[in-house]
Image (cartoon, helix red, strand yellow):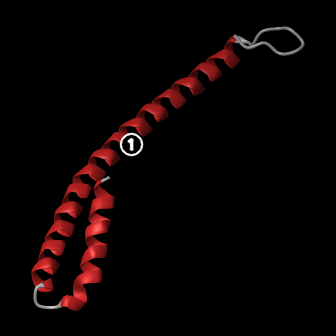
Amino acid sequence: MRRSASGPSLSGKQEEKWRFQAEILRAECNFLRMEREVALRKLDRHRGQMEAALKSAVETLVSVNAKHASLKPIIESLCLYVKLARA
């Protein structure tokens, strides 16, 4: 129970308001926690798709590299990016 500096405790109506606000905050917190979990699952799903796309792009560039040596720095940069993305 909350008490003011002058001593008397909160009236029943004031205490009910505080309890109601606390319940609303708990509900909002639970909702935000659920939203966060959904967002993290979505991020993981998209991360896998992005890794697959990058891997495919690197493989394509590696096969092209046999024909064009000037692409080597670009391919090395992409390979490094893919390694860093997985870390």
Q: Quadrant of residue 61?
A: bottom left
Out of 6 and 38, give the one closest to the viewer: 38
Instruction: Tell me if 5 is positioned left or right of 74 in this view.
Output: right
- The picture places residue 24, in percent across and down from the top left corner, at 52, 29
Check disc 1 and report the residue beneath it. 36
- The picture places residue 37, in percent across and down from the top left corner, at 34, 40
Q: What residue type is labelled 1?
A: Arg
Q: Which residue is drawn at 29% across and 82% down?
A: 73
Q: Is residue 40 above or below residue 13?
A: below
Q: Residue at x 31, y 67 (%)?
A: 81
Number of marks drawn: 1
- The picture places residue 54, in percent across and down from the top left corner, at 21, 68
Q: In which quarter of the image is residue 4?
A: top right
Q: Which residue is drawn at 13% across and 73% down?
A: 59
- The picture places residue 46, in percent across and down from the top left corner, at 24, 57
Q: In this view, does 33 lie above or below 54?
A: above
Q: In which quarter of the image is residue 19?
A: top right
Q: Quadrant of the N terminus?
A: top right
Q: Which residue lies furthest to the right in this view?
A: 6
Secondary structure beneath disc 1? Answer: helix
